[in-house]
Structures are given as structure tokens and as C-alpha cells.
Image: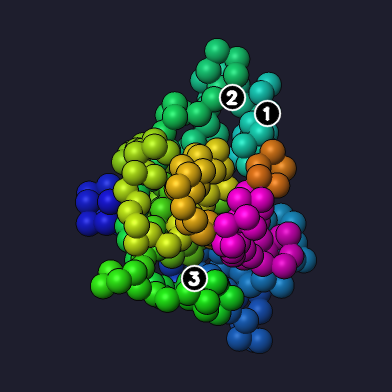
Amino acid sequence: MCWGTSVCKPKHYPESHRGGTMFCAAHADRDALAASVLKRCGACYRQDPALVEVALHIHARLRSLRGLVTGPKREGQHVCPECGNHCRLDEGEVGFCGSYMVRDGKVVERYQDEAVVSWYFDPLPTNCVADWVCPVTTKNSLSLGRYRLKNLAVFYGSCNSDCLFCQNDSYKDMMAAGRPRMSPEELAAVSDSATACVCFFGGDPACNARHSLEVARRLNEDRLVRVCYETNGNISSKWLNRIADVVESTGGTVKFDLKAYSPEVYTALTGV
């Protein structure tokens, strides 16, 4: 578990990813609110594509302060198939998510057979947004004898977005440090008979699909453990059906966190 360790403690930087709010510089007469780091409201970004480029430079600057790849790479020879960003990488380059790189002319996992990940147990019912449709909380007893059932919460320390107001911002410190790391076998081994479900979040499981699916497979070798994903939805077609299949077969849920309806505002907020 990483909570409380130096890896996961938020650090302070000259400019905060969270920031605050202000009135839009172009629409102050309308009291249009804007994120202070972006300075303009959503209407401005929808109307002026040049502002989106400014926002991308803001993302790049903030990520560079944390030692992260500044943006999805678009000019390399090798296309990463692992998430929806499809970074184009040259030899030795690391993808935007920090989980993949090109080595010897191939896109490979940066940390072979491991992911940057932490975990903890959450007693059921949790604060899951899908608890009202979840069979664990709506159909089953929440206890096993005198033991309360629990969720295995799996927090990935990598993401294929760069949301300015991420509520789990500590994943970036994990991504920069490249730790803690666990193999699927090690992570699945923390489960016990009271573990009713697993939820993959972060960061985001979209760029850790193979690892999460192998964890899910191992958890379900001897008994049913329901599998859930909390994701931005930027999942590669390579993995999408496999994720959907394991969620459906175990009676889990997929929760999509959509940041904006318009592409311009989405890119301004997420950096992709």
C-alpha cells in the first residue's frame, strides 16, 4: 500500500494542477467562470482553437515540473497500441502514460511484467457511484460469517490523461518515481476469502490493461470476484472487448469519467 508513503504524498510546485477559479478574461461582464490556470471559459475554448494550443503548453510545462513526459508523442516510427492515445515513439522513448517504451525496435512494458501500482481494502459498501446497480451491495449479504466483505481497490500510478483538476493527483509522483511496483501475481495474492470485488482505478487502468486483466484472471481462478473499472474511457480497441468480457462475466461495472462534451474543452482540461 502506498498511502502515507513519501511516494504518494502530494508535493508543492510553483503552479498547482488544481488551481482555483476566476472570471473569464474575455467574458467578465457575464460572470463566466474559468479555471485560473486556463484563464478562459469553456465558450472561449470552443470558439478559438488557438487557445487549445495554449492549454497544451500549460499542460506540458506543469508536467515537466514533475519529471513527466510532456505530451503524447506524434512523430516517432513505432505506434503504441496499448491505449487510445496511440503514441508514436522512437527508440528509447517513453510514452505519455509512462508505462510503455520502445526497446530494440518494439513497444514493450517499461517495467517488464510489473505495473506501478498500490492497493488497499475498502469495507463494503464503499462510496462507489455504481453501488445502486452493483450485485455485491444489492443482492448479496455484506458479511461472511463475522467478517465484513470488502473491495480490493487497485490504484495505478500511471494515466493517459493529464486532468488539471485530478482528485487522485498523487499518481503522478508514483509515475515519476516508477514505484511502488507489483506483478499481477503479487497483487492477486493479497486477496482473501472476504474479497468480494476488485476495482481498478488510479491514474487509469486504460494504460494498464494487460496487467489488470491478468490480476482479474488470477482473482477468479477459484471463486467469483466481481471486476470493476473506473476509467476515462480512453481504451485501445486491442483491449476494449476483453475488458468488457471480464466485467460482464463477473457481474462487475465500468464507470466512465467523461470530462467534457466538446473536443476543445476536453483537450484543454485533459491535455489529450
Nearer-N-terminus badge (1/2): 1
Q: Which mark is residue 136?
A: 3
Marks 3 and 2, Cα distance to the nearest angstrom? 38 Å
Residue at the image position 33 percent from the left and 54 percent from the top: 192
Q: Residues within 10 Å of mark 3 (few under 14, many from 20)?
A: many
Q: Residue 190's x, y, as percent?
A: 32, 48
Q: Which mark is residue 107?
A: 2
Does any portion of residue 151 appear in the rendered image?
yes
Amino acid type indicated by mark 3: Val
Q: Residue 266's x, y, as percent?
A: 66, 61
Residue at the image position 61 percent from the left and 86 percent from the top: 31
Nearer-N-terminus badge (1/3): 1
Residue with the most extreme top position = 104
Range shown magenta: 243-272
Q: Which mark is residue 79?
A: 1
Residue at the image position 45 percent from the left and 60 percent from the top: 197
Amino acid type indicated by mark 2: Val
